[in-house]
Amino acid sequence: MKNLKIALGIILALATFCASAQSGKIEVQWLGNAAMKITTISGKVIVIDPYLINNPKTPPEYKKLEALGKVDLILVTHGHGDHFGDAPALAKLNNAPVWGPAGMNQSVITLGILPAELAPRMGKGGTIMPFGPNIKITATHAEHSSELMWKNPATGKDETHVGGEPVGYIIELENGFKIYHMGDTGIFGDMKLIGEYYKPDLIIKTRRM
């Protein structure tokens, strides 16, 4: 497969990856664990798995959510705290939707963590075009668990809720450049099919903490 493949370890070393394009530049910035910030050619900012404030791997300057600047959209691969983490706070700060597995976001709405307009449901295989036809985001299969941990404000106790099925994301940007964020997935056979079908240019595989 004639693609550029970069694992988290390489991104960790590079900190920021830039892909040149005829009409601009794409920036992919690693923010610790699975957290990524993607700035598209048209300046849209997509943040994936924003576990930042309590993440020991996050650069100190980004432990304040305001340091990210304006965020247009948030993607969460599954309900574990080191991925869902600061998504609600970041969504409220920017009035930006958190797209995530349908079961996870249903729990988020039911528990009152976010209003429905900031927690749209997304199923595997579904494609959204949140900024018009030039940027497409598709949820792919992933293999691991996805419980949603929540501290009940009434009792102060941690509770475990439905987190839906975990996903990865294919993010196709304005110039056709494709990023495959695999999340925490274990190895499964259809990775080959995903690679052949979507032909990603950049592959991000995070390691579990």
Image (cartoon, grey):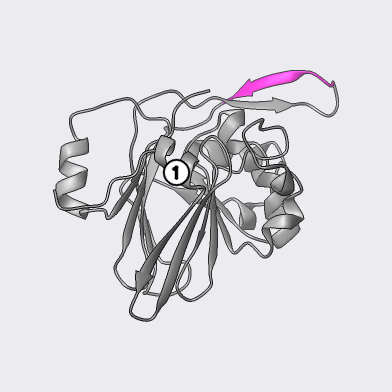
Q: Position of residue 120 (x, y in %)?
A: 54, 53
26 shown above or below 193? below
Q: Position of residue 35 (x, y in %)?
A: 55, 43
Q: Which residue does the image show at 73% across and 56% down from the upper left? A: 67
Q: Which residue does the image show at 64% across and 45% down from the upper left? A: 87
> Which class describes the residues within 10 Å of circle 1: few (<14), some (14-19), or many (20+)?
some
Q: Which residue does the image show at 69% across and 20% down from the upper left? A: 159
118 shown above or below 40? above
Q: Which residue is mark 1?
A: 11
Q: Does the magenta portion include 160?
A: yes
Q: Quadrant of residue 113?
A: top right
Q: Does the magenta portion include 177?
A: no
From the viewer's perspective, is 15 left or right of 60? left
Question: Magenta span covers which residues?
Answer: 156-161
Q: Position of residue 14 (x, y in %)?
A: 47, 47
From the viewer's perspective, is 27 left or right of 97? left
From the viewer's perspective, is 146 left or right of 110? left
Q: Quadrant of residue 153?
A: top right
Q: Which residue does the image show at 18% across and 29% down from the upper left? A: 189
Q: Amino acid at mark 1?
A: Ile
Q: Residue furthest front?
A: 13
- For the residue pair 180 and 131, the one nearer the viewer reads as 180
- For the residue pair 59 and 208, the one nearer the viewer reads as 59
Main SS of the magenta part reads strand
